[in-house]
Image: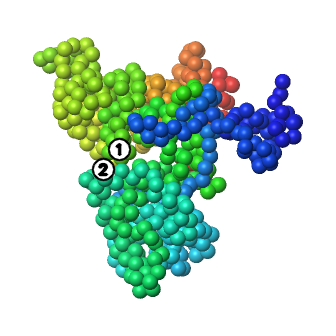
Amino acid sequence: MDAKCGFCSVPAKLKCAGCQQVVYCNSDHQKKHWRAKHKHECAKPYELARNDEVGRHFIATSAIPKDTVLFTENPLVIGPKWNLDEYEQRSPVVPCVGCFADCNLGQFYCELCRWPACKPNCPGLDNTNLHGLECGILRFGRPPKPGDDPDAFFDYYRYDALLVLKCVALQICQPSLFEQIISLESHYEARKTTSYYADADERIVSYLFRNFLEPLQQLERKEGVVVLKMCDRKTLHKISGILEVNAMVIPLSNGREICGIYARGCLLEHNCMPNSFYTFDCSKGMRLTFRTGRDIQKGEHLTTTYTHSLWGTQLRRDHLKTNKYFACRCDRCSDPTELGTFLSALRCMGLESEPCGGFQLPLNPLLETSDWQCNRCPVQVTHAQVNLLMAQIGEEVDGVMGRKCSVKEFEDLIFKLESFLHPNHFHLQTLKHSLIQMYGHFPGHRLHELSDATLHRKVQMCREMMSIIDVLDPDSFRLTLYAGVVLLEQQAGLVELNKRRARSAADSPEKSSDLGEALQCLVRAKQILRNEMGTLQGKKLMEQIGNAFERVSALHGNA
């Protein structure tokens, strides 16, 4: 029997995101029923809990189906990324302070504070949730003039400090939001001895005081009025720590990234194999939506991930301990094989340089100083030896990835590292993900120029990468963009193989098999990318997949 709308009793399917028990025929009736009655009786399928190990967290009070909206919320504050790379900070193309659209440094400005804008009348310049929040404080600065040294512009317009300033400025117009932010965990004492503290002291705290806050405080003393009650160096450092631990990166539709703090969003617990994920709606004030990625059982903690799913265990745990101040002990981190993927495993050199065919794995992956043991012979290596090898390999991989390298340089490095690493090792996956895209797109390596052996290798690498993704992201909600690229490249290789078999005039059953597999790749890619349509990369990738789907469907129909 069809469920009926809780407001008007007509057949309906739109479920209440909170309790999942009441349905509605449209969102307007849902809002009316909420105000009239349902807000007093709605029971969310989870509750806030606390324990000594993970602190505050959400726990499921009943079974929650896959794709359930857990909650939506607007940010407490948003602003430019507070941890920009050097090349981002010194780029002449900067985000508009009013709307984050790209604009050229030196073209248009906010008329009041002289910070770059996309146009003089950008609506965000007056919006108190956007630039209007910090504009009054930025007016105390002395911006560089046309003709000044270009470095003066980069040194003055430090976008990575704006989000901290926005948080401070909330005291003026929205003190309740400031109280919510300043009450979040900052790990202030733990950060004081780290390089992150020293970096923030110069890059953010000293910069803000030198250019804006000291002139403001001079005026406060002169007028006998205090505008910012909490505005000392410790407060700014605490806010920096709060952002480091709690800020979420928001991908915009123009390809740029900003950061935001969400009151409930920052309460979700980390797990390297999470059960939920989030998306942002840029058209609704960067509204955050948390959704279940799989079925969740009663008693499970609601989890997301705060690190890269395709890093090895040691790198993930180091990142979390350094940036989030906790040690992950999830099932994946606890398993030396990382759920059978061997993403961190090393080849065993065997006894007397005679390889045994086994792989070195950590005896205790949760212990930083754990030695490693071969899974086939008695050989062990120390953690110091492993760390030295990984540091050297990491430098080589970063070097190749960080500069314009040829296909041969990638091939040579992969061949070299395969002597030391498991074929699934995360460093090899990084290189292979780039190589499968170079095969088919680089001059001299277009699809029609590849040898049959290279083309088969491209397809096989894609299949192997997808087998790893299927273990680490079995419900396809975390590695979607990464997997989408792999599937697109896999189908491209399969289609080219089909063309070559067709030209050979051989009536081979592999022809239709290739096209069938290519179609399956594209269908799956379209499905897993459905939650990435708010990002520029997701839209572009989906467009390529849609075009490829039309071409392959036509070929398959004629096969």
> Considering the numbered disc 2 on the image, is that residue within a helix, a strand or a loop?
helix
Give x and y (percent) for residue 270: 45, 37
Residue identified by numbered label 2: 190
Question: Quadrant location of residue 293?
Answer: top right
Q: Is residue 145 visible?
A: no
Tell me, for residue 224, which label it has, or none: none
Pick the front one: 120 or 70: 70
Residue identified by numbered label 1: 325
The mark that comes first in sequence, 2 or 1, is 2
Pick the front one: 364 or 228: 228
**Label 1 neighbour load within 10 Å: few <14, some 14-19, many 20+:** some
Q: Amino acid at mark 2?
A: Ala
Q: Amino acid at mark 1?
A: Tyr
Q: Are marks 2 and 1 in contact (CB under 8 Å)?
A: yes
- Residue 99 lies, with reference to residue 227, above or below; the image says above
Pick the front one: 224 or 100: 224
Left or right for 555, reference 499: right
